[in-house]
Image (cartoon, rainbow, N blue to C red):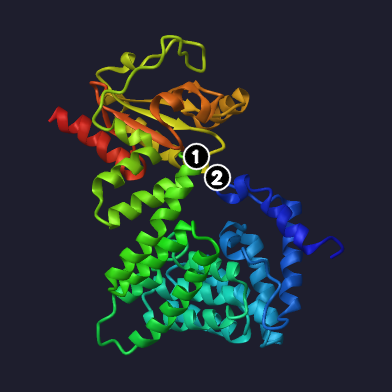
Amino acid sequence: MKESNADVWNDCLNTLENRGLATVDWEVAPDVQKKLINYFKSKIDEGVSDGKTSLPPDLIDYIYRFPKEMRWALRVHAEGALESQPDNGAAAKYLAIETLKVLNVTIPFNQKRPLLEKAIEQLSKDVEICFFAFMQYGSYEEDENALQSLEKMFERLQDASQEIQCEWIYRLYDYSEVWQNPNDIYQGLNTDDPFIERWNVVFSKIQTILKKQLEHKPNNWAAARMLAEIHETLGDTETVKAVFKEAQPVFEKVLEQKPDDWDALNALTNIHEKLGNTELARQYQLKQDPTLAWKGQILPDFSSATVDLDGNPISLTDYRGKVVLLDFWAVWCGPCLGEIPNVKAVYEKYHDKGFDVIGVCFDKDEAVLREFINEKEMPWRQILDKDGFRGVFAKQYGVRGIPAPFLIDPNGKVLSVNARNNLLGELVKTEIEGKQN
């Protein structure tokens, strides 16, 4: 290929809205698909160099988005490469990822495992394949194999930089990637389990990496929290308190310079909860998310000058007698878009029984907003505040992040400021059907 391989892959990712996080209906254009097929075939043909492949590191995150015909073409190519070159680790890795991430879940794991084991064996310096193996073994509760994957992963991380080591630790504890993190597996072991000592060695390596990270970046709350959670898992409650007490002044100092720093407020909320300082934890929590203070309170109305997207006056008092979701969102907000199908489903089920929605959108482009609303067939009224987090609505209601869903009862009292996912439907059902019975 004449054009840069990296450019082909990055160009593909850049066709994804928010790099794939905001939409699930992305499709690969035919010309891009052809380039990608050639790109991956060349990567598979390159095989292994110095214990690694040149396959893109984020293939695992995106392969399920590939069209079936594209995956079929690449699978055939990889199978042929592996048949003619049994030591082709790139082919083995591609097949392992595709088979375990995409193919029919009814295929027994025992039939998938050999590809994974072959890829790990042939890629002596590939950290990602070990992490992928940990993900898979953890999801099937194969604790011994999960442990072996971690051991190999840390062997391969020995010469990596501190930042890279930390990145992999963070991923081990990210529930959006792993079904069970190392703490979860350890807590499920019996006290006489023969693998306890090996797990202790793994935890020691994780702790060493996190401690070095905190020495370098004392205000890294993620590292401090994970370190404390590991000590808690190991039953060392005094060290847990020591970690939090050491972190406390660091974040207090951050707040002296930046009183609204979200990470510092979040850290101090968690620290004081763990230290048993309930009232202090609540104070920091309210500073972090002022919307929490509205729960159980009558929500004040909009200003009298407020109009909806069509220029019509709108007021919360207009909705008295109904259960109302006041939904702060934006077209550019991935989690907001992910919640829209859920809101629509609840709206369609309960609108005729007394449920309604008011959207407050923080977008700047009205045309984009109108097009999106029409495309997604969102029937409820919308208010556009182009000033977003600096606007009157954010200031009035303490909104510092979106989505921010206020669920309001028929009397105007706030039932919840976290009414998302299944909770929205459950609360609306209780409020409407419970009072009708």
Image height of 102 relative to 348, above or below:
below
Q: Residue furthest left?
A: 437
Identify residue type, mark 2: Ala
Q: Give the image quarter of residue 180.
A: bottom left
Which residue is more in the foreground, 144 or 69? Answer: 144
User: Can you name the residue that lies furthest to the right here?
Assistant: 2
Residue 174, image quadrant: bottom left
- In terms of secondary structure, where does tag 1 sit? helix
Measured as percent of width and height from the top left, residue 303 is found at: 41, 13
Residue 26, labelled with which disc?
none
Disc 1 and disc 2 in contact, CB within 8 angstroms: yes
Q: Residue at x 25, y 83 (%)?
A: 191
Q: Residue at x 47, y 13 (%)?
A: 307
**Image point (76%, 52%), residue name:** 31
Image quadrant where residue 242 sits: bottom left
Local secondary structure at mark 2: loop
Left or right of 28 on screen, residue 197: left
Dot 1 crowding, Cα within 10 Å, few <14, some 14–19, many 20+? some
| Vertical side of 255 occupied by 158: above or below | below
Visible in this render: residue 144? no
Q: Position of residue 189 (x, y in %)?
A: 29, 79
Q: Which residue has dot 1 on it?
A: 337
Seen in the picture, residue 367 relative to 181 is either above or below; the reply is above
**The N terminus is located in which quarter?**
bottom right
Could you say where residue 347 lies in the image, as x and y percent from the top left? 36, 31
Taking the image as drawn, is residue 258 in sight? yes
Q: Residue at x 46, y 71 (%)?
A: 135
Question: Residue at label 2?
Answer: 22
Q: Separation of disc 1 and disc 2 at Cα?
A: 7 Å
Q: Nearer the viewer, residue 415 or 252?
A: 252
